Image (cartoon, rainbow, N blue to C red):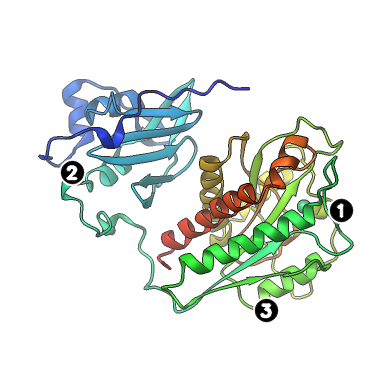
Amino acid sequence: MKKKIIRSFLLLTLLFPLYLSALNIREEMKERKLPSYLIENTAYISLKGLLRIIGAEDSWGNVEDRVFIGYQGTEIKFKVNSTSVMIGQQVFMLDVPVKEVEGEIFIPVDNFNDILSGITPASHVSQEPFFKENKPVKSAKPQNFTILIDPGHGGNDAGAIGHYGLREKEVNLDIARRIRDYLKKESRHNSGVKIYMTREKDVAVSLVERVQMAQDIQADVFFSVHTNSSRDRRPDADGFETYYSVVKEEAVYLPAVSYSEEADTEDEETSTVSRMLEELNTSSAVDESRILADFVQERLAERLLTPDRGTKKRSFYVLKYTPMPAVLTEIGFLCNPNMECNLRDIEVRQAIAEALANGVLDYLKFRDVL
Ligand SMILES: [Zn+2]
């Protein structure tokens, strides 16, 4: 078990002075003689340097690769290798990710400067979102936005089975229903948001049918829910992960499903071939899938104490042949008796469902749908 470090995390209890002149990180770096680091042609500042500049040395903390900073009475959260930054309830995207080099965290200077300079002291914060102009420019709110939730397996196909008999297909369906209900409630003010499921009952639905349905209803997001098992059902397998495909294939006639696309037991790292394909295939659906996966994984990490196995690239059939942004989350290992026991608890199921749904909602906000 990795030791988690939570440093003094004072945040909202701190009272900050009410003045705030425009922040200029570059200028401050020069003045304080703080070095700038060039990573892949972008100027970065070390986290320590940034904390000094913004005077937040006593109001930050980190848990593994996640960093929390209390700044001007607002909470800033970000993560190593991720481009999303949460400031209060708002999500902002950096052009390049936060990096970690030899145990030290580095933040892109100019990007972060833009984001931070929009923050006003807490006592002055209005209900308006911070500096809207820094959000990626998107078209006006779409009339309709369709989410297709895909509970894995069903009918004859039970999916993974726990050592004490809990079946994956039941867990997936129950959590998917809870996601649907939560999303409906949270998106009730936008009647254009429609939520469908690939199955509402314990019935068999082939992978081809699932993809077909996503195409037929022209879903904007495809979200598949699974529960994992290691190949030899190891009781110590543990953690949650979210997959996206770096290959999207258009197919008029959907091909038959191969074993490797169907299996959802844990697997080796991405092959060299798919890494090469990844470089060729940079469609926006792939990028958006990665962003959605990041949001979902982030929200799960907030709620679950099990290991964060990260977002992963893998061409599962339902991810590869769905033309829209698509992710598949493995919420935990059913072959782990502890997790199996937890997954019988409806409160745990509800918590997981809400975390997953909040990841989707973050994405909807990012797309300016909500
Ligand atoms: Zn599964």
Residue 103 falls left or right of residue 236: left
Mark 1 packing: few (<14 Cα in 10 Å), some, or many (20+)?
few
Q: Residue at x 62, y 53 (%)?
A: 280
**Quarter of image, res 142:** bottom left
Q: Can residue 325 be seen in the rendering of this structure?
A: no
For numbered disc 1, what is the local secondary structure?
helix
Residue behind mark 2: 121
* Residue at image location 81% in from the left, 51% down from the top: 167
Q: Residues within 10 Å of mark 2 (few under 14, many from 20)?
A: some
Q: Identify residue type, mark 2.
A: Pro
Residue 172 shows in this picture:
yes
Image coordinates for residue 206, horizontal then vertical, percent: 82, 67
Horizontally, residue 290 falls left or right of residue 123, namely right
Task: Check if mark 1's residue and mark 3's residue have beta carbons within 8 Å.
Answer: no
Where 229 falls versus 154 (above or below)?
above
Nearer to the camera, 62 or 352: 352
Cα separation, mark 1 vs mark 2, equals 55 Å
Residue labelled with disc 3: 216
Residue carrying label 1: 259
The first of marks 2 and 3 along the sequence is 2
Which of discs 1 and 2 lies nearer the camera? The answer is 2
For the residues labelled 2 and 3, the Cα–Cα distance comes to 48 Å
Q: Residue at x 54, y 57 (%)?
A: 357
Q: Nearer the viewer, mark 2 or mark 3?
A: 2
| Amino acid type at mark 1 | Tyr
What amino acid is at disc 3?
A: Asp
Work out which quarter of the rendered image holds the C terminus and state it.
bottom left
Q: Where residue 186 is drawn, which disc sits there?
A: none
Tell me which residue sits at (50%, 55%) in the image: 358
Give coordinates of residue 54: x percent, y percent: 23, 31
Residue 334, picture quadrant: top right
